[in-house]
Image: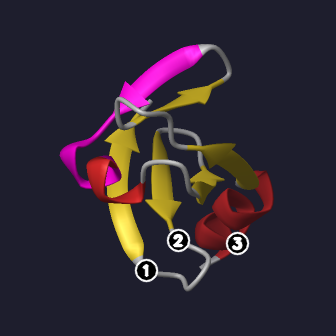
Amino acid sequence: MKGGEQTMKEARLLKRKVDISGTVSIFGQKCHAPSLLDHIGETVHILESADKWILFTDQEQFIACLAR
């Protein structure tokens, strides 16, 4: 379990707005997932870990998981 605890400490929570094309910009990198098209204009939460970004809504509804 100790490794899992360390991973959670390294994770960061970000917020980004979904643009008209269904993409979010994360540290200058444009990221797109088809499921983001349902959230155009909304601010989504992004849980950043060492190898992926997990996107979800304010209501904690899963949107996508993207490799970094």
In the drawing, what numbered circle is on residue 5?
3
Q: Position of residue 53 (x, y in %)?
A: 49, 46
Q: Specify whether 36 is left or right of 27.
A: left
- Please report the residue visible at 53 percent of the width from the left and 71 percent of the height from the top: 57
Query: With respect to residue 40, does 31 lie above or below?
Result: above
What residue did someone put label 1 on? 61
Q: Quadrant of residue 38?
A: bottom left
The secondary element bearing badge 3 is classed as: helix
Mark 2 vs 1: CB contact within 8 A: yes
Q: Is residue 42 magenta?
A: no
- Please report the residue visible at 79 percent of the width from the left and 61 percent of the height from the top: 9
Mark 3 vs 2: CB contact within 8 A: no
Looking at numbered disc 1 in the image, what kind of residue is underneath it? Gln
The C terminus: image quadrant: top left
Q: Position of residue 13 (x, y in %)?
A: 74, 57
What residue did someone put label 2 on? 57
Q: Position of residue 46 (x, y in %)?
A: 60, 54
State the colouring used for the structure image.
Answer: secondary structure
Q: Position of residue 24 (x, y in %)?
A: 51, 34
Q: CA distance from mark 2 to mark 1?
A: 5 Å
- Please report the residue visible at 69 percent of the width from the left and 65 percent of the height from the top: 8
The foreground one among 37 and 14 is 37
Bounds of the magenta segment: 29-36
The secondary element bearing badge 1 is classed as: loop
Query: With respect to residue 52, does 20 lie above or below?
Result: above
Mark 1 vs 3: CB contact within 8 A: no
Q: Earlier in the sequence, mark 3 or mark 2?
A: 3
Looking at numbered disc 3 in the image, what kind of residue is underneath it? Glu
